[in-house]
Amino acid sequence: MRVLNFAGGPAQLPEEVLREAQEAIWELDSTGVGVLETGHRTPAFDRILADAIRDIRTAGDIPDSHEVLFIPGGAHMAWALLPLNALQLGDRADLIDTGTFPTRAHADAVRAASLIGAQARTVWSGREANYAALPTDGDLPDCAGARYVHYCSNNTIEGTQWRRPPHVAAPLVCDATSEILSRPWPYARHAMVMAAAQKNLGIAGIAIAVVHREFLESMRDDLPVSLNLRALHAQGNRVNTPPVFAIWMCGRMAAWILRNGGVHAMADRNQQKAAAVYRALDECAPFYTGAARPHDRSVLNVSFRCATPALDKAFVAEAATHGMVGLEGHRTAGGIRASMYNAMPLSAAHTLADFMRQFAARMG
Ligand SMILES: *Cc1c(COP(=O)(O)O)cnc(C)c1O
């Protein structure tokens, strides 16, 4: 009996895609070979890769100026590869610190930059205010002269989300892990958008990177091949054995998004889910406190807490008895978090909202 899984990631996948996976594990497209056994130098994998890239491009409306790469290792690997590949001696990377994941990305950028004789600096941080709010353009320096400016468009743990990218005078790099293909997004305005797959787009172990071709071509080419983004691109995502199944899943998720109305339909439905849960949260105030300032609330990750950690724990435990799991907040943040990515149906948000009202009425 499957439950509603509100976990932050790895996250719930659509039933349709799981059924396709069951079949493909046995046999992929009448090849007589299952997807887990499919070689990365076969026509079958050529097709998997080409279809995945085509459908991600179509779903994201990604312009021809940008390449789609698959980076094994997830978002942390992409964070490390970015400064290693993009920075040269004397360069500077600017970073906007809006939460736990950006903080970690920045720490790695500092390490990578110091190896290269480059610099990575934080130009804005929401840490003092518990990351409850995002900066407005007026809060940010223009970042002129930076090789790139890194920001995180949806802060998975704190539950904040940018309405649009920041305006700065340097190439933009976005970590969109927890929101990739959940709404229309201006890829054309970015030097690079990276996203691990295990939230909106598949399973753990792979990140996609949408990289402007000129940005890619301007990268250094003296890194070992497995760390070298130009080599990854030049060798067709096959510097070594790629995670074939993880890439297949990205392709099936992108196809599922397209079959279900594309990112506009995803965005509509995600808005409705978020509205249902935030409505319950606000109606029950002050029993629940939202983590994010209302203006910056994330549509995908609703972070909140009760008056005491004991109540948070009771909420999570009782929700589990109603078939809702994964509601505990991130281990670094505590509290409660409901993650509702593309695959989460609208009915699940209503089930959660009803439970929130009922729990508050009983315990408040
Ligand atoms: C989950 C998440 C990550 C971490 O992804 P890994 O694949 O574990 O490296 C990074 N950034 C954001 C915004 C996330 O939500």
Image (cartoon, grey):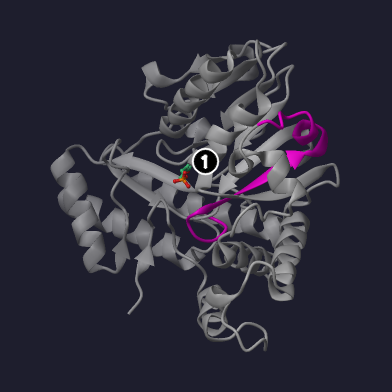
> Dot 1 corresponds to which residue?
77
> Where residue 133 sits: x, y (%)?
47, 25
- Categorize mark 1 by other alpha carbons within 10 Å: few (<14), some (14-19), many (20+): some
Closest to the observer, 327 or 272? 327
Query: In the image, 324: left or right of 226?
Result: left
- For the point 80% across and 34% down, the residue is 217
- Horizontal side of residue 264 vs 101, given as left or right: right
Q: Measured along the vertical axis of the image, is residue 186 above or below residue 326?
A: above
Against 132, residue 187 (above or below) is below
- Tell me which amino acid carries mark 1: Met
Q: Residue furthest left?
A: 310
Q: Does residue 334 show up magenta in the picture?
A: no
* Residue nearest the observer in this picture, 315 or 179: 179
Considering depth in this image, is 335 or 61 the residue closer to the camera? 61
Query: Which quadrant would the N terminus be assigned to in this image?
Result: bottom left
Q: Is mark 1 within 8 Å of ligand 1?
A: yes
* Residue 285 falls in image quadrant: top left
* Apparent side of residue 178 relative to residue 187 in the rendered image (left or right): left
Tally of marks: 1
Image position of 150 with respect to 313: above or below: above
The segment highlighted magenta reads 200-222
Q: Position of residue 209 (x, y in %)?
A: 66, 45
On the question of residue 363 being in view, the answer is yes
Describe residue 109's horizontal placement relative to residue 356 as left or right: right
Q: Is residue 185 visible?
A: no
Residue 246 percent across, percent down from the top left: 55, 63
Q: Residue at x 67, y 13 (%)?
A: 143
Q: Nearer the viewer, residue 289 or 291?
A: 291
Q: Is residue 205 magenta?
A: yes
Query: 270 above or below 292?
Result: below
